[in-house]
Image: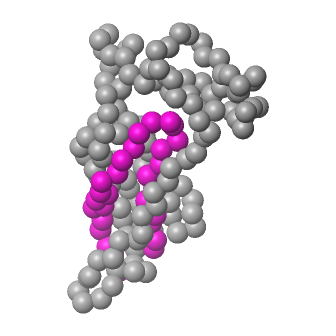
Amino acid sequence: GHLEGKTLDVLADGVVFPSATVASGQITVARPVATIEAGLHYQSRLRLLTPEIAVMGTTAQGAAISVNEVIARLYRSIGGTIKTYDAAGVEKSSESLPFRKFGESVLDRPLVPFTGDKRVNTLGWDKKWTVELQQNQPLPMCVLAVIQKVTVND
């Protein structure tokens, strides 16, 4: 009853379905499914701090930094996006983490959770970069580590 009239994210048989609104205590999906999970939408966001690097006995804080590559070490994850923002908070790059390989044998099957490293190359300089990992879908995302390859210029 507490979800009546609310719009829910739906994961059925391991596949993201279109959002559904609760009516009379139920939701309706487009086809029969064996398993279903539904809940209120939320966005997971992991925002990294500006890296601190000792440069010839001084700090890198305030220097122009180029984030050349971001490596997300994931455990049993599906989906997600890596975004970079400049000092003013303007989005500079956004790249979805690829998880699906194409071919006839995979089109009608849910994705298998991935464990390992996903790399994203980014370009650009700014005094303060912000890197953020996001998960907008009702899918698992467990981040074990984030590695940034950066260049510092005084």
Q: Quick check: 88 left or right of 103?
A: right
Q: Tell which residue pokes out farthest to the front in this image.
A: 1
Q: Position of residue 22 (x, y in %)?
A: 71, 27
Q: Which residues are magenta?
A: 127-154
In the image, 125 versus 139, the foreground residue is 139
Q: Is residue 95 visible?
A: no
Q: Position of residue 146 (x, y in %)?
A: 32, 57
- Give the residue at x 32% y 33%: 113
Given residues 75 and 121, the one toward you in this image is: 75
Residue 17 place in picture, x, y as percent: 55, 23
Residue 10 visible, this angle:
yes
Residue occupying the point 43% across, 24% down: 14
Instruction: Say whether residue 65 is magenta.
Output: no
Residue 106 at x, y percent in the picture: 32, 16
Front residue of 111/148: it is 111
Residue 150 in magenta stretch: yes
Classified by dominant secondary structure, the portion drawn in magenta counts as: strand
Give above or below for 149 relative to 19.
below
Question: Quarter holding the C terminus?
Answer: bottom left
Q: Quadrant of residue 51?
A: bottom left
Quadrant in which residue 53 is drawn: bottom left
Residue positioned 38% across, 22% down in the render: 110
Q: Looking at the image, which residue is at 32% across and 10% down?
A: 104
In the displayed structure, would residue 134 be above or below residue 131? above
